[in-house]
Amino acid sequence: MVGDIYAVGLNYKTAPVELREKLSCNISDLDSILQLLKTSADGVKGFMLLSTCNRLEFYAYASDEKYVLDAFKRYLDIKNQHFDKTHFFLKAGKEATIHIFKVASGLDSMVIGEPQIVAQFKEAFFKAKSLGTTDKVINRLCQNALHASKRVRYETGISKSAVSVSYAAVELAKRIFGELKNHKVLLIGAGEMGELAAKYLQRSGASIYISNRTYERAIALAEHIRANVIRFEEIEQFLYEFDVVLVSTGAQGYVLTKDVVAKSMKKRHYKPIFLIDISVPRNIEPSCADLDSVFLYNIDDLKEVVENNLSNRFQEAKKGEFIILDEADKFYKWLENLELEPIIINMLDYTKNGSKDCKKIVHRAIKLIRENKEYTPLVFELLGIKLNEKEIDYGFVER
């Protein structure tokens, strides 16, 4: 073929986090790095760079793997790192295509089926496209990868099960209350797990309030997800207003005690309240579960949900593999036919002034060589069309 698909890089399967963090590239640096690679990536027709916490991967369409490796090594030079075969992988052809489709679909993620990678892949592709580092082939590759991802989401149940504690907590709340749109939710703690839970809650349409010991941190997260803020020292005063309370702090003691919750339940007229404690050590006094209409879940309760759901996801991932293979075959067929374009254009030139029957014969011949390009020299010979040097260079006849 004139060119092929390549994937080179490292990920959580091949390299430790110490190396991955050294090679990571944030979105603000991506512009300058892509521009630099664009001016020096000889032999690479189109490319994109995907950088996440779990992977740094370079996808390219090139005439030879040496050009792809040269371009990737230039990136390593920018990061003052050297190429170590023990930590990097190189895939080519259909194997590379399948890998890229699996990455975009979340089938290659540390947490199978995690949805965040789809947005990251899309952002990386659009950034590369806007800077002109992609070409017709890479554009088609990425569009097909995103289509494959969509099929995996809709044709399997891979995204229907909660696989993070934060996500499981929100899903559990939705099971108890149904839609959260008409419910008030209090998030106590604005750390990593709290922030993740806040993002899931935002999608649910709930009315979200955030409280944190560091008030400025609560303000920052609230602005990010368009939520409200309650001062930490005011939690007891307003607790009765909330249907769901999710606690995730680094406190070493109880943030919510049985006495505090009991008082709020009296104010709520014992309307049910859902308490979720994903803190370690626990931040909600366990005896709160003894109170009427109080439903308390801790991190171990949610881990059981997560483990069961992970098992379900692995089963659904097997179905996703067949979708990926199907989509990869379709893309690779398109890529092979792409090389026939100059040949087909040549053939169509012969029909401009021909009869209707002549045009029918040529169109049938085009269909035949699209199905199997090995027929090209024979078809041309039967039609009396002489291959020029350009077509010979495409490898359809021997020199």
Image (cartoon, helix red, strand yellow):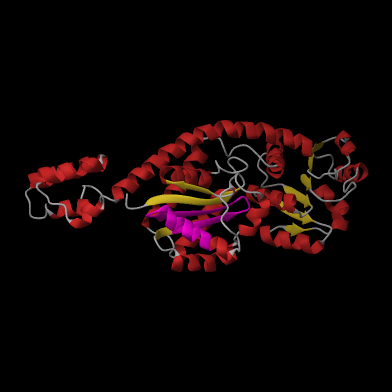
Q: Is residue 49 magenta?
A: yes
Quadrant of residue 221 in the image? bottom right
Instruction: Judge from the rendering whether residue 245 lies leftward or rightward of residue 41; answer left or right.
Output: right
The foreground one among 326 and 273 is: 326
The foreground one among 78 and 47 is: 78
Residue at the image position 52 percent from the left and 32 percent from the top: 318
Residue 372 x/y as whole percent: 25, 40
In the image as oriented, which residue stretches furthest toward the right? 259
Total marks placed: 0
Residue 29 x/y as whole percent: 58, 66
Q: Is residue 131 visible?
A: no
Q: Quick check: 347 above or below 218? A: above
Quadrant of residue 20 in the image? bottom right
Residue 371 x/y as whole percent: 26, 39
Instruction: Judge from the rendering whether residue 350 lies leftward or rightward of residue 123; answer left or right.
Output: left
Span highlighted in magenta in the image: 47-74
Residue 190 x/y as whole percent: 76, 55
Residue at the image position 49 percent from the left and 48 percent from the top: 90
Instruction: Judge from the rendering whether residue 230 lies leftward or rightward of residue 42; answer left or right.
Output: right
Q: Is residue 169 visible?
A: yes
Quadrant of residue 178 in the image? top right
Q: Is residue 294 magenta?
A: no
Instruction: Judge from the rendering whether residue 192 lies leftward or rightward of residue 70; answer left or right.
Output: right
Residue at the image position 82 percent from the left and 36 percent from the top: 293
Q: Quick check: 219 above or below 307? A: below
Residue at the image position 57 percent from the left and 50 percent from the top: 10
